[in-house]
Each structure stands twice: as C-alpha cells, then as structure tokens.
C-alpha cells in the first residue's frame, strides 16, 4: 500500500511539472520557447495579444507533440491585465510549474520625442506585468515547494541606452529583480533565472523601429537558439544567462571599466540610424 501511494505521488508530481505559462508566445523567443517545451512533452498555457497566431501555434504543437495547449489572448500592458491573467490561469487548474515572462517591447527615439503613452505602456508590460506574475505565481510555487521562473531580460540591461532609454532601463530592472527574487525563493524550492540575450532576429527590431541602426545591421542570433539556451539555463537553476560568450565577457569584464561618457557615446552611436 505504501508503494502504491509513493508511485501515485510520483505520477502526480510528474503531472504537475508538465505545464508552462509563457507570455508573448505568438512570435519570436516566446514562440520558440513554447515549441521547445512542447517537444519535451510539456503542456502549455500561452498568451499574447494576437489570438489568431496563438491558435495557430496551439494547433501546431498539439498535432506535433500530442500535448495540451490552452490559449489566452490578452494585452498585458493594460491596467490590471496581468492580475486578470493570473486569475484566468488559476481557473484552469493547478499552478503551472514553469512561468516564463517573455512579453515585452522596445521603441526607438529620444525619450522626450517619443509619445509618453508609449513609454508608459512599455513600463507597464516590461516591468509591471512581469512583477505581478512573478509575485502571484512565485507565491503559489513557494507554497507548493517547487517551480521555475524564467524572466527574459536583455544585454541591454547591463548599460544605459540612449535612443532606447526606457527599454534599456526596463531590462536593467528585470536583470536586478530576477536575481533578488531567486535569492528569496530558492529556500522554498523555486528558482528564478534571467535570460539576457544580445540582438535576436525577431519582429522586435521592426516593431521597435530599429531597422537601419548599427545594432541590427550585423544580424543576430536565431530565436530558436536563444530559446533553447534560456530554457536549459532555467531548468538547471542558473541565475543569469547571456547567450553569447563574447558578450558575456565584454559585459562582465570590460563594460564596467569603461568611463560612463564613453560608454554612452558608443551606445548612442550603435542605435543611431544612418543619415
């Protein structure tokens, strides 16, 4: 009888680790994270603004991997929407074992020339929604005694970014916040990893109006490769993961010693468009 209970507990634990909630899953890194998780046999709850893209991904993953995929079409930059997402996810059943906060956007231009509403929406999505979901699901995971969180930051979070001032600052927040939360949650069996990639070939550059800048001129890594690196780091309980060794060395061992004005000038030039 004891053996039967033990086996049943193991099966229940296995089932509980099958579901990942991924925000911003309709394209780019989020979409590839969903594909990678599904390839491992994991169920999914995917959310983004674009319902048609979510439904197409749901059909693809369920057909290819025989997993269960639930979709929630929602704009997380809206007031109170992240908390509403939490309520809808909890209504589906168990607490997801994995939370991946991937949704976010950037925008090119000097801060005072950009629309303030756009800058505030960026803060709402890149910071407030991420904090809300980490708070709510992190608390539930802590009570359960297990869980993994992956917050998608950026190498942009390691330095100030003229012409993307709010975006770079938001990613600096994500980088710092994620590490502190990991330290707080680790004693309860929950880890929080921050993925900090360099430039990635996704819709981001076009949406953020970065085409024509030196930042994107040389191309970037594929969303698929970055998703795998971030996911594997999360599963291993890593704290910070930069997807390129060269970038990791530069950001950790060179950038901190560059005089601020020189660093700002370099960052400004990289994000300037050719005249």
Image: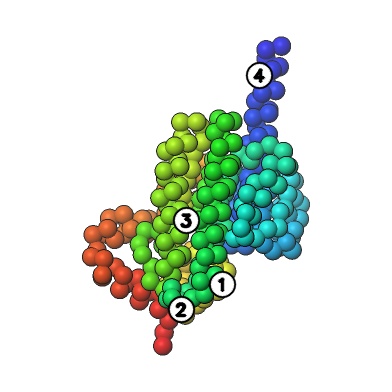
Q: Marks 4 and 3, how far apart in space?
A: 39 Å
N-terminal-most mark, 4 or 2: 4
N-terminal-most mark, 4 or 1: 4
Q: Position of residue 49 (x, y in %)?
A: 67, 62
> Which of 87 and 92 lies nearest the eye of the viewer?
87
Label 2: state its secondary structure: helix
Q: Marks 1 and 3, how far apart in space?
A: 17 Å
N-terminal-most mark, 4 or 3: 4
Q: Which callout, 2 or 1, points to the residue nearer the camera? A: 2
Labels 4 & 3 near each other (Cβ < 8 A): no
Badge number at residue 207:
1
What residue would you read off at disc 3?
A: 153
What residue would you read off at disc 4?
A: 6
Q: Marks 2 and 1, how far apart in space?
A: 17 Å
Q: Position of residue 178 (x, y in %)?
A: 45, 47
Q: Marks 4 and 1, how far apart in space?
A: 51 Å
Residue 81, placed above or below residue 270: above
Q: Position of residue 251 (x, y in %)?
A: 33, 58
N-terminal-most mark, 3 or 2: 2
Label 3: state its secondary structure: loop
């Amino acid at each position: 009888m004891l053996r039967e209970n033990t086996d049943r507990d193991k099966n229940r634990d296995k089932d509980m680790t099958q579901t990942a909630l991924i925000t911003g899953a309709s394209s780019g890194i989020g979409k590839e994270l969903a594909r990678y998780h599904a390839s491992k046999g994991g169920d999914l709850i995917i959310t983004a603004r674009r319902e048609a893209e979510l439904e197409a991904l749901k059909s693809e993953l369920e057909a290819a991997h025989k997993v269960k995929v639930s979709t929630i079409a929602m704009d997380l930059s809206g007031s109170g929407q992240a908390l509403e997402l939490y309520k809808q996810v909890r209504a589906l059943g168990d607490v997801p074992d994995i939370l991946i906060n991937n949704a976010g956007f950037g925008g090119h231009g000097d801060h005072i020339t950009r629309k303030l509403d756009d800058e505030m929406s960026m803060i709402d999505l890149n910071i407030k929604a991420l904090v809300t979901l980490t708070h709510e699901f992190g608390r539930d995971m802590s009570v359960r005694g297990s869980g993994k969180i992956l917050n998608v930051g950026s190498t942009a979070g390691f330095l100030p970014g003229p012409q993307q001032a709010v975006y770079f600052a938001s990613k600096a927040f994500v980088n710092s916040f994620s590490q502190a939360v990991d330290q707080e949650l680790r004693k309860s069996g929950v880890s929080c990893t921050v993925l900090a990639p360099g430039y990635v070939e996704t819709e981001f550059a076009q949406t953020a109006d970065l085409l024509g800048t030196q930042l994107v001129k040389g191309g970037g890594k594929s969303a698929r490769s970055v998703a795998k690196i971030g996911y594997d780091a999360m599963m291993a309980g890593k704290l910070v993961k930069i997807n390129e060794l060269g970038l990791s060395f530069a950001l950790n061992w060179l950038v901190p010693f560059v005089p601020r004005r020189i660093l700002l000038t370099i960052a400004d030039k990289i994000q300037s468009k050719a005249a």
